[in-house]
Amino acid sequence: MVAFARTRIRWKYTTDTGIEYSFNALTDYSSQSAVLGGSAAAAGLRPHPKGFKPRVALCWLAANHANRRRVVCYSNAATAYTTLGTAVNVDVGGTATEYIVYETEGERHASLGSL
């Protein structure tokens, strides 16, 4: 089993309209930038506003579809967001575990609905 790092990094999220926000992401998610998108956030990049819900990939464990996770996709061009069936390593009790994307959800704002 491979440990899943619990350390965090400031990571850039780009909205569907091109606005950039800074997210506090686990480093093992940021290391999957080819799949989840994003890049290191520049100093001073503002955090996402209160009530903002980012786009996510809904994933399940291939061997047991009852085990599900939501993973933020930092770009709308991220492979996990554009290609169902993409493998993503997620944190399961501190262990990196491969899950498969079965659906995606777009970003929204709690008070505005879909953006």
Image: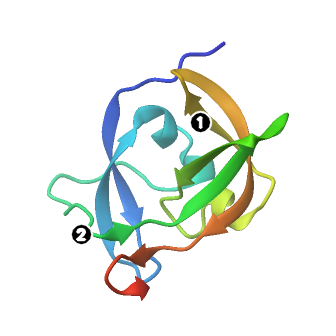
Q: Report x, y in % for residue 54.
A: 44, 65
Residue 69 appears in which quarter of the rendering? top right
Q: Is residue 25 left or right of residue 21?
A: right
Q: Residue at x 52, y 23 (%)?
A: 4
Q: Residue at x 46, y 55 (%)?
A: 38
**Mark with earlier residue (1, 2):** 2
Check disc 1 and report the residue beneath it.
Answer: 90
Where's the N terminus, which quadrant? top right
In this view, 11 is above or below 107? above
Q: Report x, y in % for residue 112.
A: 35, 87
Q: Residue at x 62, y 58 (%)?
A: 57
Q: Is residue 59 left or right of residue 108?
A: right
Q: Report x, y in % for residue 115.
A: 43, 86
Check disc 2 and report the residue beneath it.
Answer: 49
Q: Residues within 10 Å of mark 2 (few under 14, many from 20)?
A: few
Q: Report x, y in % for residue 13.
A: 39, 62
**Gap between marks 1 and 2 measured at Cα:** 25 Å
Amino acid type indicated by mark 1: Val
Q: Secondary structure at mark 1?
A: strand
Amino acid type indicated by mark 2: Pro
Q: Is residue 115 visible?
A: no
